[in-house]
Image (spheres, rainbow, N blue to C red):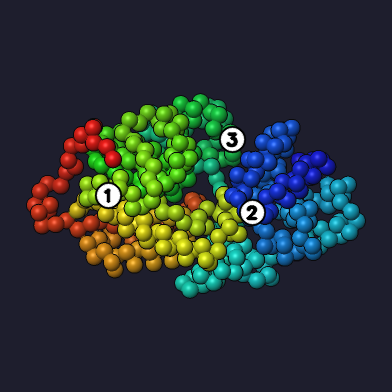
Amino acid sequence: MHLTPPQLDAAIVAMRTVLPLQYPADAIMRRFFRENPMLGGQDRAFIAETVFGILRHRFFLESLTNGITPRALVLAYLAKFQGMNLRELAPLVSETESKWLAEIKGSKPDVLPLVIQAEFPAWVVEKLQHGMPDSDILDLGLSLQQPAPLDLRVNTILAKRAEVLETLAQEGIEAQATPYSPCGIRLIGKPAINRHALFLSGKIEVQDEGSQLLGYLLAPKRGEMVVDFCAGAGGKSLLLGALMNSKGRLYAFDVSEKRLSNLKPRFKRSGLSNLHTQRIADENDSKIKRLSGKIDRVLVDAPCSGLGTLRRNPDLKWRQSAQSIEELKAKQAAILSAAASLLKPGGRLVYATCSFLPEENQAVIGDFLTTHPQFTVLNCAELLSQQKIPLDTGEFLQLSPRLHQTDGFFAAALTRAETAETAKTDHKSEPVSETETV
C-alpha cells in the first residue's frame, strides 16, 4: 500500500492511545475508531494491523529504538515487519530517522536474549524454564507472534458444514474444514463475516477450533443436565446446546450481567431452546448449591491469564504479572471445587484454560485431586477418539498454535466416582421437568 502522512499520523495517535495498556487493547481500539469516524475501512485495517503488530513484536522493537516513542515504534514496525522499503518511507521521515531505519532493516533478532526473541516478559520465561527447554520456549513464543486465523463453528442445529463450505466457495470466500473439530471451518483471510447472511441467520459463529474441542471433550448427550460454569459471552454454551440437539437442560452461569446480555442475540439466532442463562454472585451462590449432585456434565472454562491467546490479545503480556497469576490460581481452585460439587456420581467435568502456564493447569488439577479423592482423571486422547477426533496430546488436552494452529489451550477431564448404589443402576439421566429452575 502507499502510505500517506494522515495514515501514519493516525497510526501513531492510535499507538499512543493504546500504550498505557490500562484496558484491553481491542476495547481501546474500538473506542478510538468510534471517536474517529472519518477513517475509511482501509485506514482502519492498516491502523489496527499496525497497533497489534507492534504489540506482538514490542520487546524486539523497543530493543532497537532509542527513545521509545509511539512514532519510533510505528516506523520501526513498518520497516522491519511490514517490509516497507526506505524509499517509500523517505518522504515521511527525517534524515536521522532514515539512517536509523536502515540499521533496523539489517538487524538480526536471533542474536538477542530469549525474552526478546520469544517476545515474553522475563517472569513468563522464568516460569516456563521450570519444565521446558529454551528451544521450545522460543518455538512457542514465535508461534504466538503470528496473527491468528479466523475460525468459525457451524451451528449443527441449523446447518451442515459441507453446505456452509459450499456457500462460502460460491461467494469466493476461501475456507477449509478444520482438521480436528467436526463442526469447524478455517477462513483464509479476514472477510467481514459478522455481516454475512450465514452469521446473521445463526448458521455460523466465530470460535477458535481449540475452544470448539472443549465441547467435544465434555460430550454432553441429549436429555442431560449440563452446566457451563463460566459461560462468558456464551460461545461454548451454544456449542454444548447444539451437541445436545437442544434436548435436556443447559445452564450458562456467569458473574457478569454484561457478558450474559451479549449472549442474548447469539442465543436468539442459534435456534436453541434448552439454554438457561443465570447470573451468579460468585462460585458460592445459592443457585449453585441447589443443583448440587444433580448435574451430568460441567464445563469450567476458568478465568485465567489468557496467555494462550497472545496471537489475538498480545497486550495481555503487560496486563498480567507473576502476582496476578497467584491471584488467578486461588480463584481457579475455588471455582473448580464449587463446580465439582454440582456433579452426579459418574458425571464428567472438564476444566480448561487458555493458558500454557503449568501452575494454572496441571498444578490446579493436582491440588484438586489431593483434596477431592472421589474424582479421577480421564484420558483426553481416548475421549476425543470416542468422538472420532484424531488428536492425541496425552492424558491432558494441550493445544498450541505451533502444533495445532489453534490458540494455546489446556483441558483436563475428570469424573466423579460412582457409589455402589448408582453403579447398580443403568446410569441414565433423569427426566428433567421443564418447570425446574435455579
Q: How far is mark 2 from mark 3, CA to CA?
A: 28 Å
- Drawn side of residue 124 relative to residue 202, left or right: right
Instruction: Count residues near mark 2 (Cα–Cα under 10 Å), then give few for <14, some for 14-19, many for 20+.
Output: some
**In the rendered image, which quarter is residue 124 located in?**
bottom right
Q: Is residue 363 above or below residue 231?
A: below
Instruction: Count residues near mark 3 (Cα–Cα under 10 Å), then give few for <14, some for 14-19, many for 20+.
Output: few
Sequence-first disc among 1 and 2: 2
Whether residue 389 is visible, yes or no, is: no
**In the rendered image, which quarter is residue 239 located in?**
top left
Which of 427/400 is in front?
A: 427
* Residue, far right: 95
Query: For the residue labelled by badge 2, is the local secondary structure a helix, a strand or a loop?
Result: loop
Residue beneath disc 3: 191
Residue beneath disc 2: 21
**In the rendered image, which quarter is residue 103 located in?**
bottom right
Q: Give the residue type that dot 1 points to.
A: Lys
Percent position (x, y) of residue 391? 38, 53
Viewport quadrant of the C terminus: top left
Instruction: Count residues near mark 1 (Cα–Cα under 10 Å), then give few for <14, some for 14-19, many for 20+.
Output: some
Which of 64/172 is in front?
A: 64
Percent position (x, y) of residue 247? 27, 34
Q: How far is mark 1 from mark 3, CA to CA?
A: 44 Å
Sequence-first disc among 2 and 3: 2
Residue found 25% across the figure and 61% down from its top: 375
Query: For the residue labelled by badge 3, is the local secondary structure a helix, a strand or a loop?
Result: loop
Q: Is residue 176 above or below residue 89?
A: above
Q: How far is mark 1 from mark 2, CA to CA?
A: 38 Å
- Drawn side of residue 365 relative to residue 355, left or right: left
Q: Residue 289 bears which disc, if any?
A: 1
Q: Give the residue type that dot 3 points to.
A: Pro
Contact between marks 1 and 3 (CB within 8 A): the answer is: no
Which of 131/315 is in front?
A: 315
